[in-house]
Amino acid sequence: MKARLEAGKVVKYSQIPNQVDNILGGARNLNPEDLGFYDVVVPDYDPVTQSISNLHMESSYASPTLEDPNATRTVFIYDVNDKTISETVDELKQRRINELNSLVYDKLQPTDFYITRFTEKAVSIPSAIQIARDAIRTTAETKENEINALSDKAAILKYDINF
């Protein structure tokens, strides 16, 4: 992706247009930097705890090469900012546990028929179904305990509830 300044604003392009400014055709064949187009750099960031914003031009972006380890170049780059997490640790834990419970519900739901049939008609639940359901509940209990053991907001947000 490329970008350039146009009327004081950064405009991003997936490809360089063939017509640029007073060049009516063949602009793609020219050096993009001669037309003011520079690479867009998305810095490494953690989307759970950080956000990117303020795409801006930086003329001294470190771009080392084998020939010149101190080389720099002009790019458009985003600023990385830490997100403000307004929920408390307990609120975050409860949110993750609610998400876990929803996942458990989705995993148990396909075999609920066996439980209903057993309750209404005393038809036995196949052992494979009972074992699978017990495994789901055991895994969920372990994950809930792991969530409750966390004390860092970022760790709670990043905790993988999937199984």
Image (cartoon, grey):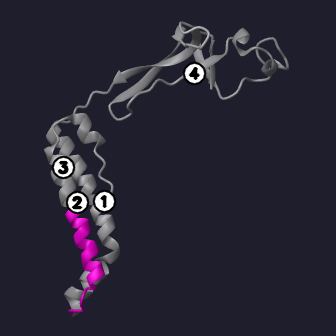
Tag 4: amino acid:
Val
Helix, strand or loop at label 3? It is helix
Return the residue at label 4: 40
CB of mark 3 within 8 Å of CB of mark 2? no
Q: Quadrant of the C terminus?
A: bottom left
Residue at x 72%, y 15% (from the top left corner) = 32
The residue type indicated by label 3 comes to: Glu
Residue at the image point whose x is 64% and y is 22% from the top: 2
Q: Amino acid at mark 2?
A: Ala
Q: Are marks 3 and 4 in contact (CB under 8 Å)?
A: no
Residue 59 located left or right of residue 16: left
User: Is label 1 in a helix, a strand or a loop?
Assistant: helix
Category of crowding for the residue at label 1, using alpha-carbon neighbours closer than 10 angstroms: few (below 14), some (14–19), many (at least 20): some
The residue under label 3 is 146
Q: Give the class, few, some or many, for how many residues have Cα within 10 Å of label 3's Cα (few <14, many ≥20).
A: few
Q: Would you place residue 83 above or below residue 54 in this image?
A: below
Magenta residues span 122-139
Give the residue pinned by disc 2.
140
Q: Nearer the viewer, mark 3 or mark 4?
A: 3
User: Which one is in front in this view, the residue at disc 3 or the one at disc 1?
Assistant: 3
For numbered disc 2, what is the local secondary structure?
Answer: helix
The earlier-in-sequence mark between 4 and 2 is 4
Amino acid on which disc 1 is placed? Leu
Q: Residue furthest right?
A: 25
Mark 4, Cα crowd under 10 Å, few <14 / some 14-19 / many 20+, is: many
Query: In which quarter of the view is residue 89 placed?
Result: top left
The image quarter in which residue 86 lies: top left
